[in-house]
């Protein structure tokens, strides 16, 4: 009977130790980290980088396979990269030395292109001596190239490995600085992109 009680006590102790370990490994957030994470997420979108871009537009008006009018325009713009901080995935683990390791999953970068149409400059143009096109045709063609050039530029910034790499590094740096400024000085920060 004593042997059974000892075994039961040992079994209960082992179960308690396992449950205790399980409970301690559940990520119960200390107050300062929890409030920091909430503050960070409430920030919304964070602009991590902007880059000046130039969009070149080529306008051709043709009649019977002959260029009657051609023009080249240069339009300045800005590629903007942002991170939606409300979508950050933040987890943490308490290490043996009592410090916390924050593991931060950064959502995919969002990109936008702001074009300054009012600053468009005509670089050069050509008009055939006996131009038979109308202002309406020219305007319609210009609107077509505006959309095409915008779509092309947006695709180029979305596929620019150099810009995206710089924006990701900037995002990591800025988010790390934000986290460190929010009462998390005892934390090691590890970041990755989701």
Image (spheres, rainbow, N blue to C red):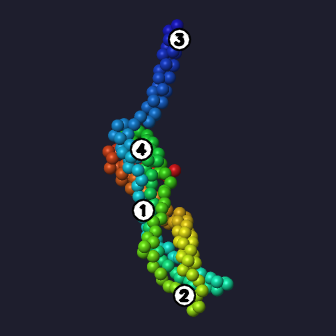
Q: Nearer the viewer, mark 3 or mark 1?
A: 1
Residue behind mark 3: 4
Residue 30 image point, x, y percent: 36, 37
| Residue 155 in the image, given as x and y percentages of width and height | 55, 65
Quick one: label 1, few (<14), some, or many (20+) residues within 10 Å?
some
Residue corresponding to mark 4? 101
Helix, strand or loop at disc 2?
strand
Marks 4 and 2, the one that precedes in the sequence: 4
Residue 173: image x %, image y %?
Answer: 40, 56
Of the numbered discs 4 and 3, the one sitting upstream in the chain is 3
User: In front of the other: label 4 or label 3?
Assistant: 4
> Which callout, 3 or 1, points at the residue further toward the start of the chain?
3
Instruction: Indicate whether 82 appears above or below 39.
Output: below
Q: Looking at the image, which residue is at 40% across and 46% down?
A: 41
Instruction: Tell me if label 3 and label 2 are in contact, CB under 8 Å.
Output: no
* Label 3 or label 2, whichever comes before in sequence order: 3
As measured in the structure, the alpha-carbon distance from the residue carrying label 4 to the one carrying label 2 is 64 Å
Asked whether residue 166 is in view, the answer is no
Q: Which of 188 and 165 is in front in this view?
A: 165
Against 9, residue 63 (above or below) is below
Question: Which residue does the numbered mark 2 point to in the structure image?
Answer: 126
Q: How crowded is mark 2: few (under 14 residues within 10 Å), some or many (20 or more)?
A: few
**Badge 4: few (under 14), some or many (20 or more) residues near its Cα, within 10 Å?**
some
The residue labelled by disc 1 is 49
Q: Position of residue 88 (x, y in %)?
A: 45, 47
Helix, strand or loop for disc 4 = strand
Residue 152 vertical placement versus 30 (above, below): below
155 on left or right of 93: right
């Amino acid at each position: 009977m004593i042997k059974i009680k000892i075994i039961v006590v040992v079994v209960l102790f082992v179960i308690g130790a396992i449950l205790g370990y399980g409970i301690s490994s559940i990520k119960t957030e200390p107050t300062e980290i929890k409030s920091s994470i909430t503050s960070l997420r409430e920030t919304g979108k964070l602009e991590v980088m902007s880059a000046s871009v130039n969009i070149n537009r080529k306008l051709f008006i043709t009649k019977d396979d002959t260029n009657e009018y051609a023009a080249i325009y240069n339009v300045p713009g800005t590629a903007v990269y942002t991170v939606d901080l409300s979508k950050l995935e933040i987890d943490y683990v308490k290490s043996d030395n009592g410090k916390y390791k924050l593991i931060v999953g950064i959502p995919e970068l969002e990109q936008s292109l702001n074009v300054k149409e009012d600053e468009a400059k005509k670089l050069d143009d050509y008009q055939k001596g006996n131009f038979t096109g109308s202002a309406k045709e020219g305007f319609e063609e210009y609107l077509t190239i505006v959309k095409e050039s915008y779509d092309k530029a947006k695709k180029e910034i979305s596929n620019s490995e150099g810009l995206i790499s710089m924006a990701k590094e900037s995002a990591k740096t800025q988010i790390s600085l934000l986290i460190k400024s929010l009462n998390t000085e005892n934390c090691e920060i590890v970041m990755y992109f989701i």
